[in-house]
Image: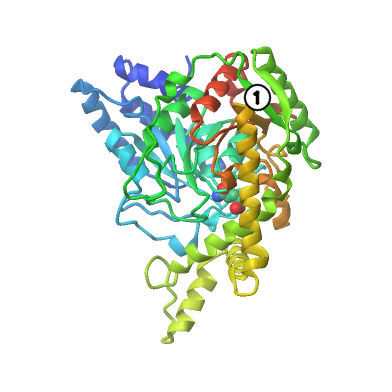
Amino acid sequence: MTELYELTISEAADLLRQKKISSVELTQAHLDRIRAVEPEVRAFTLVTDELALKQAEEADHRFASGERLSPLTGIPIAIKDVISTKGITTTCGSRMLENFKPAYDATVMKRLNEIGIVMVGKTNMDEFAMGSSTEHSAFFPTHNPWDLERAPGGSSGGSAAAVAAGMAMGSYGSDTGGSIRQPASLCNLVGLKPTYGRVSRFGLVAFGSSLDQIGPFARNAQDAALLLQAIAGNDPLDGTSSPNPVPDYSKALNGGIKGLKIGVPEEYWVEGTQPGVVSAVRADIERLRELGAEVSPVSLPYTKYGVAAYYIIAPAEASANLTRYDGVKYGYSYRDTSEMWDAMEKTRQFGFGPEVKRRIMLGTYALSAGYYDAYYKQAEKVRTLITHDFEQAFEQFDVLVSPASPTVAFKIGEISDPYQMYLQDVFTIPANLAGICGVSIPGGFSEGLPVGLQLLGRAFGEESILRVADAFERVTDYHTQWPKL
Ligand code: GLN
């Protein structure tokens, strides 16, 4: 018999409806799993066990009353610690917010609570979502369940590790430049970044406001569709959220990709990509061809400027967004002085870690008089060119495919140069700059470690990438593999 924590969300939802299991049992199985493996994985900044059992009981009452419920009702889910949870600490992996309890829920959280999910905990992350390894949490690094000496990727590494280790059935993260897709790739999960505007950012602690999106981690495409469905849609509290109607994502999973046009961007096969990653992804692309997709090469010539433009734009926005942490409004406050400027300076000196300070300095510099035209304006022009690249490609193709990350999971401590760390997102960043959607799915293994296959879709094309993901799962078993923990 499979363990309860090994079920997919849709399997568990069926069993809950047939009353073969209760949400309390399902939740307890996950809390037991957390007790068993969390001391080694360290995916959570906070395990909300009491709350989880209370929510599970409520879900069981709702099932008993015969109410029509969402497939996520009563399902144990983990939430990245960048998503505001009313009255529950939301640290962003930072000393600055170590004791911060938001006064309201993020819109995403509000919707999930209405559905009646079970929140098992808040997950660890690189401080303020800046990083690709979850080593740069102010508290502790998270370990990759596939090899505990390795990083799970980041910045949403806690959300990825929690699902990969069976401590939650699904989770949510945020993706500004790759923070959902890259950890999904390193942990053998489906990780989806929705189109910019598809999901409300209200209550998501801001990093790069024109790039940030919340999205799900799941063990298969079907679960990812359910998790996306629950959070997608317009929100009057977020002026950048789209009024476009939300399709039924599960309906898109019909297995058929015959005749679908898939482009393989030539610029995504760069030097520095591990040969094991290249060969796995090449084989995956052949699989898609065998399934009847029409696969051909496409050129996205401005790709090579993506990382450079991102590391101007994201820090510029971050430097503005992080001015609010001044020791007065939220979080940590340095009190051993009577001088106001001294208090603010020391608050920021002690409250922020080195990577956050680096981003604030980069961003402030790029936005300062005299440098604005040379850096920020240039980067915004590059962003427009990258967007045009995609627009042209999507005139001919439905979906583009590439590796999600240039490497498999690396050892904790292995990448010490910040620039090397930035290159982890070379394949994911362009989608954030262009605002399109993307997903990383389990695409095979290299030396026993997971390789992610990235599928990119046009704006509001989540159905296409989910359809391809699901079709691919029907002929492969990578997504069913578990780490030995
Ligand atoms: N690794 C990238 C960065 O550090 C992306 C992070 C993210 O998507 N939040 O900026």
In the displayed structure, 258 sits above or below 163; it is above
**Tag count in the figure?**
1
Q: Kindly give the residue lying farthest to the bottom in the view shown.
A: 338
Side (left or right) of 383 relative to 459 = right
Side (left or right) of 413 relative to 61 = right
Disc 1 residue lies near ligand 1 with CB under 8 A: no
Residue at image position (37%, 32%) is 245
Residue at image position (48%, 17%) is 2
Side (left or right) of 87 relative to 464 = left
* Residue 435 on image: x %, y %: 54, 43
Side (left or right) of 56 relative to 278 = left
Q: Identify the coloring.
A: rainbow
Residue at image position (51%, 77%) is 345
Which residue is denoted by mark 1 in the rendering? 262
Residue at image position (71%, 45%) is 302
* Residue 246 on image: x %, y %: 39, 31
Give the position of the C terminus as an image quadrant.
top right
206 vs 100, nearest the viewer: 206
The answer to whether one can see residue 429 in this image is no
For badge 1, the amino acid type reads Ile
Quadrant of residue 457 in the image?
top right
Q: Dot 1: few (<14), some (14–19), or many (≥20) neighbours within 10 Å?
A: many
Q: Kindly give the residue lying farthest to the left in the view shown.
A: 65
Q: Secondary structure at mark 1?
A: strand
The answer to whether one can see residue 95 in this image is yes
* Residue 398 on image: x %, y %: 59, 26
149 vs 198, nearest the viewer: 198
* Residue 336 on image: x %, y %: 44, 81
